[in-house]
Amino acid sequence: MRRCPLCHNSQTYILLQDKKRSFYVCMTCGLTFADASSHLPPAAEKQRYGRSRVASKQRQLSQFILPLLEQLQYHQAGSLLGLNFGRILDQTSLTTIESAGHTLNQYDPFFAPDHDTLKQEYDFICCYRVFEHFQYPIKEWNLLTRLLRPGGWLAISTPLLVDLEGFAKWHYKNNLTHVSFYQRQTFEHLAQNSHFELLFAAKDLVLMQKTS
Ligand SMILES: [Zn+2]
């Protein structure tokens, strides 16, 4: 039995054991997580993330953030202060955001560990393909909820786990840096227990709003 690294419940069961790792499912929040003994050490993790910082990934990141910002502008007039958590956006896209009057701070534990960015309150926070890397997601969840102002938005891109029975064939779990997998139910649980409203959750996009 393994304790859930998100809701701390110990009612979990083993879903799959493959050649490299064991995966467990939490019966309370639905998080599916890799056994902690298989977590990569930080140096190996950093090396892999360095590889993923190629141009095509940068494009995907800006294609996530720029339309999101356009949507948020409909809901809140004036300039927005946002945090891009877990990855770094390219300079061109940053300039686009700044020339529209907004500010986007960035935090990446490996490549931009600027802790001053974690001492402010934000209108929105975006996490593009970051949640799946959280080894103890309750830690980051608590941090992100603290950094968001009441009424602020949290936009998460992570492929939702929709078919537990098909997990063994799901390629996304094969990347050793992917350690936490979320179902829609997981975000419903978080919303109910952390004063959030779950606005949208499908495919690989989750949008939540912190209630005032
Ligand atoms: Zn749980």
Image (cartoon, grey):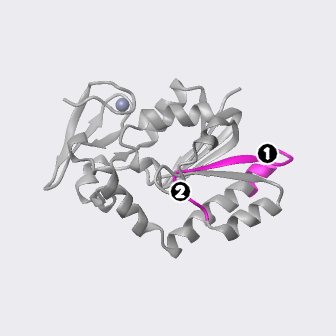
The residue under the point 26% across, 49% down is 165
Residue at disc 2, CB closer than 8 Å to ligand 1? no
Q: Give the percent coordinates (x, y) of residue 164.
A: 29, 47
The residue under the point 80% across, 50% down is 74
Seen as rendered, the residue at the extreme right is 78
Q: Quadrant of the C terminus?
A: top right
User: For this rendering, which residue is in front, 140 or 74?
Assistant: 140
**Callout 2 crowding tier (Cα within 10 Å): few <14, some 14–19, many ≥20:** many
Answer above or below: position of 105 versus 139: below
Q: Which residues are magenta?
A: 70-89
The alpha-carbon separation of the residues under discs 1 and 2 comes to 25 Å
The residue under the point 33% across, 55% down is 43
Q: Give the percent coordinates (x, y) of residue 2.
A: 23, 31
Looking at the rendered structure, the kind of residue marked 1 is His
Looking at the rendered structure, the kind of residue marked 2 is Arg
User: In terms of secondary structure, where does tag 1 sit?
Assistant: helix
Where, by quadrant of the figure, is residue 177 drawn? bottom left
Seen as rendered, the residue at the extreme left is 19
Residue bearing mark 1? 75
User: For this rendering, which residue is in front, 39 or 25?
Assistant: 39
The residue under the point 32% across, 42% down is 32
User: For this rendering, which residue is in front, 103 or 113?
Assistant: 113
On the rendered structure, is 167 left or right of 70?
A: left
Residue bearing mark 2? 87
User: In terms of secondary structure, where does tag 2 sit?
Assistant: loop
Q: Which dot, 1 or 2, sits closer to the camera? A: 2
* Residue 46 magenta-highlighted: no
